[in-house]
Image (spheres, rainbow, N blue to C red):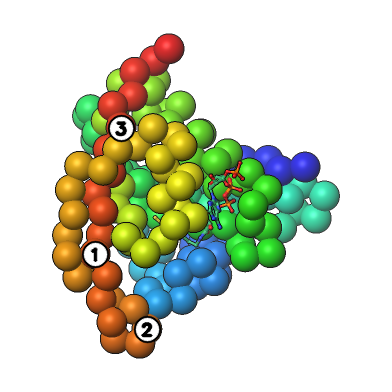
Amino acid sequence: MIALRRVGDADCDVLAALHAECFPDDPWNSEAMREVLAMPGTFGIIALDVACAEPRGFLLAQSAPGHCEILGLGVRETARRRGLGRMLLNRVLAIAAAGRHTVFLEVAEDNPAARALYAAAGLAIVGRRPGYYRRGDGSRVAALQLRLDCAEA
Ligand SMILES: CC(C)(COP(=O)(O)OP(=O)(O)OC[C@H]1O[C@@H](n2cnc3c(N)ncnc32)[C@H](O)[C@@H]1OP(=O)(O)O)[C@@H](O)C(=O)NCCC(=O)NCCS
């Protein structure tokens, strides 16, 4: 069983390990996580395997009045395609809906898994930044800018 819980101050190392596994081309270390979590309006959610209390995925977001940006979403490779990414995304969309926020995020154009996840949740492409992400091999790929206007049901 998977449980979602809010990120706390003591989670920087856990988040850094998850981020490094999910984003090997651009890992954020513990110090970077500390800085991100210290930014106003930043919050995070961790998906935990309840049976072993092991973290399986995370989501980081930053909210401001009327606005919520997803800064990062990742699920450990061994836990993918079991609904955790959708679960984390749905949780932040519910938070955004309660605050009547518009959700924004950026996703690499060559990331079909994440694009399918976001498209299914209703996020629409509203922009494109050519060459935005740099890959480990030095190549560059465009970022797609996505948006969803959330309102409480
Ligand atoms: C993107 C990511 C978070 C998805 O997490 P996940 O837990 O595997 O996703 P889910 O199991 O919740 O899948 C939800 C939906 O997303 C889509 N999806 C997920 N993985 C997919 C894949 N490999 N190929 C195609 N569609 C995929 C499907 O529509 C899926 O629904 P379905 O299983 O009913 O077909 C995960 O692949 C990941 O961590 N990737 C590396 C980091 C990353 O790219 N993060 C996003 C950056 S913006």
Q: Give the residue number, with chain letter if any, for mark 3.
A: 148
Q: Give the residue number, with chain letter if any, for mark 2.
A: 136
Please name the amino acid that badge 1 sits on.
Ala
Q: CA distance from mark 3 to mark 1?
A: 20 Å
The residue under the point 58% across, 39% down is 87
**Above or below 92: residue 106:** below
Q: Earlier in the sequence, mark 3 or mark 2?
A: 2
Say whether mark 3 is within 8 Å of ligand 1.
no
Quarter of the image where the C terminus is located: top left
User: Between residues 88 and 121, which one lies in front from this camera angle?
Assistant: 121
Q: Give the residue number, with chain letter if any, for mark 1.
A: 142
Residue 72 appears in the rendering: yes
The residue under the point 55% across, 65% down is 18
List x then y, in percent, for residue 123. Answer: 35, 37
**Above or below 27: residue 7:** above
**Above or below 23: residue 135:** below
Q: Answer few, some or many: residues within 10 Å of disc 3's Cα (few below 14, many 20 plus, some between 14 and 19).
A: many
Whether the residues at callouts 3 and 1 have beta carbons within 8 Å, the answer is no
Q: Answer few, some or many: residues within 10 Å of disc 2's Cα (few below 14, many 20 plus, some between 14 and 19).
A: few
The residue under the point 51% across, 34% down is 91
Q: CA distance from mark 1 to mark 2?
A: 15 Å
Q: Quadrant of residue 37?
A: bottom left
